[in-house]
Image (cartoon, grey):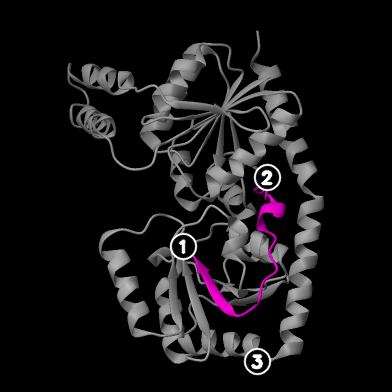
Amino acid sequence: MRITFVTSVAFGGALESSNLLADRLAARGHEVEMIHGTRGHSMLKTFHRRAVNLSTKLSGTPLEDLSWWAARHLRRSGAERRSGAGVTVVAVDVPENEAMRRLGDGVDVVVGYSISRPAWRQILGRARVAGVPTVLYLREDESLGHLDRPDAADRVVANAEVHARRARDKGYDATTIPSIIDRDRCRAETTRSVALLVNPIADYGVDVVLSLAEVLPEVRFVLQESWPLTGENLEVLEARCRELPNLELRRFTSRIADVYRDAKVLLVPYGDDNRPRVVAEAQTNGIPVLGADRPGIAEVAGAGGVLVDPASGLDVWERELRRLWTDAAHYEELSRLARQNSVAAERAEDALVDRFEEMVTELVGATSP
């Protein structure tokens, strides 16, 4: 079976998770392609975005089709390589155009995730013409917006039960298949000396962590860049690190184990209901979580951490972090539960790949002539 994954992003947890799933499927004998975006800006991206915007403004006029034609045909040959598992990986400025080009070339099923709505609409239209079934993989809250239309995909998959439940509320029979984690890349002999926040942005509660660093000078805090920090956001964090001697900003690294090399607690004061893969990565090393009590976080953290009501004040976060820092028995028990949760999740991963493989096999069989 030939499976094509396509996403608008060029980095991040969603891409990492999908790469691992693609590798597992390739190891089972499937022909798998991974098409994703490129980092940085380019003239081609700018022209494509303007063509899409123009087509929206010209909706209902004779020029609408012309602008859509221009948007669909803007494509630059991507950098193509083969992963260690044999997956064809293509990084290209306009991933949806590359995916549409390949749909008429023997693709059996196309899987979209972390993809813009205009891009997915174009792929859906081309896939229907080519008779290729589609799967939408929900990996973040904002992806639920795809489901506001009645024909968003032939099948819907979610990496968290909270997303699957909300998809069902919109009329889609969604299957829950959590992200695959490469635990070997995550493992580290941590010194357990810092409180860690990965991806220090507003949606992920960086303001809570900055406030904790002010009131807990005896605790070292690390802000680990994940999505690229630029402009004012970067300047503000660098300024706060100069003001607070117990606060450090670390730039992006592809070596996942290095992220956890000195973590004692993973901070997850997120403002959304996503299922963070960093929780699973941290728990591989027995690092407990202090996070917001949201469905996606609770689902992945299990008993291996402390969850705080998102409406709580800073005093609650301070109290729970102070206890994790000073109460050895409390910390060791949560660390044990974190490892236990990680082991159980790892054992279940083959079954997750089975579930995905069975679903796409059934879908392809049902739509084949």
Q: Residue at x 28, y 68 (%)?
A: 235
How dense is the environment of label 1, judged by Cα within 10 Å: few (below 14), some, or many (20 and up)? Answer: many
Q: Residue at x 81, y 58 (%)?
A: 344
Q: Are marks 2 and 1 in contact (CB under 8 Å)?
A: no
Is residue 334 a member of the stretch shown in magenta? no
Q: Residue at x 52, y 91 (%)?
A: 218
Q: Nearer the viewer, residue 150 or 76?
A: 76
Image vertical order of residue 14 relative to residue 126, above or below:
below
The residue to which callout 1 is attached is 199
Secondary structure, mark 1, is: loop
Q: Nearer the viewer, residue 4 or 237?
A: 237
Q: Nearer the viewer, mark 2 or mark 1?
A: 1
Q: Which quarter of the rendered picture does the C terminus lie within?
A: top right
Q: Amino acid at mark 3?
A: Thr
Secondary structure, mark 3, is: helix
Secondary structure, mark 2, is: loop
Q: CA distance from mark 3 to mark 1?
A: 26 Å
Residue 158 lies, in percent from the top left, at: 60, 45
Label drawn at residue 326: 3
Q: Are marks 3 and 1 in contact (CB under 8 Å)?
A: no
How dense is the environment of label 2, judged by Cα within 10 Å: few (below 14), some, or many (20 and up)? Answer: many
Q: Which quarter of the rendered picture does the N terminus lie within?
A: top right
